[in-house]
Image (cartoon, helix red, strand yellow):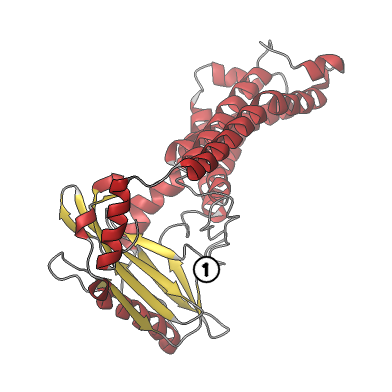
Amino acid sequence: MKGFAHFLAGLTTATFIVVIANQFYGNNMIADAIVQNKVLIIILGGIFGILPDTIDFRFAKYLQRHDYEVDMVEWDLNPHKVADTLAKAIDQAHDENREVNVMLHTVKISSDQWRQYTVQFDTENKKVLCDIGPIISGFEKRPYINTYLPKEKAHAEASFKADLKYNYDAVTHVDILSGPDFSFFPEKDGSVRADFIPWHRRWGHSVTMGILFAPIGFMLFGFTPLGWTAFWIIMLGYWSHILTDHFGLMGSNMFPPFTTRRVPGFKVTRSMSPLANIFTNYTNVLLIIFNMNAWSHVQYFTMPWATMLNLTTERYAEWYIVSLLNYIIYYILPPILVAYFAVVWWRKRKGITEELSDKEARTKEQLEEVGGINV
């Protein structure tokens, strides 16, 4: 997920903890403390919810060391250089029984133009494939059609001997910003494991780091009810980042230094998916509203299921669970389901009804003539 989604997830986690803490300590002690200029305790959830990415992209990234760096320029585009280096690193990791790191630099042409190329690991045939793509326009990644190379100059393959395990995207696009890197690790079974951007989702995205940061709550508020609440907000807010990331592909290394590899993600969505981020943010905002209402001395809204069952805050646990379930079913799930199926329907309809225009057809023919990579 994007940064704002992680921030909201941390805030949402904090509001759940405040609900629990209010019941544990009684008399709305934590809620009253928050109202009395202690709002920082909730913000801690958002701060530590976004912290794992801050650690990775501001610190861990620059601590990574590389055995090989592949750097091409526009006037010397050589896909063999990329494929050969990666294949060499794979076998070197196996033969020398150590981690080998490779950095693939992007090919920047101007402030808003980059030469795109792709890398693919064919684990079945034990080959690395590299294809030089078109020049693209910055963050839009719009290709300039007349910038494709002939196929014989754009494609390269290199073979490796080791058995390779790779569980990320089959094709990696190298185009803008600093470019990706790979680490190759020898496994006990004799194979080699490939990790995409290995400095990401390692120790910075771990249960261990959440535990280490949690005592900051005591440093801020002492060994008081507020301090214990802050302890749990920091730790669980940090873990909320790991959980939301786990719905993607990459996963995280959960317990360093006791573990050294990532636990694979659930592969439900991708971190950059607009729909996933919108749905996550919508859910978090509504849950924050619900919890803030739940811990108030006076509830500003009540849910019909609780009224039907004659549940009041005197039976808080039952009232809260029934109300929360009612709230999710009435207000959170329906808009998400409607939006999701509307987008699916629109995409299918668009795919069925859209036809290539004459210009697009001519472009396709031109690409096939030069043996370029399809857009």
The residue positioned 51% from the left and 44% from the top of the image is: 352
**Residue 156, located in which quarter of the rendered image?**
bottom left
Q: Nearer the viewer, residue 46 or 305?
A: 305
- Residue 198 placement: quadrant: bottom left
Say if residue 216 shows up in the picture: no
Is 177 left or right of 218, judged from the image as shown? left
Q: Against 153, is 227 above or below?
A: above
Apparent side of residue 308 relative to residue 290 in the rendered image (left or right): right
Position of residue 306 relative to residue 149, above or below, is above
Residue 233 horizontal/vertical position (percent): 57, 37
At which x and y percent is residue 317? 79, 27
Where does residue 227 sit, x and y in percent of width and height?
Answer: 58, 34
- Residue 112, compared with residue 106, is above or below; it is above
Work out which residue is located at the far left of the displayed protein and give it: 75
Give the residue displayed 46% in from the left and 39% down from the top.
274
Q: Is residue 343 visible?
A: yes
Quadrant containing the C terminus is bottom left
Instruction: Specify the quadrant of the image occupied by residue 316.
Output: top right
What amino acid is at disc 1?
Thr
Circle 1 sits on which residue?
A: 260
Q: Secondary structure at mark 1?
A: loop
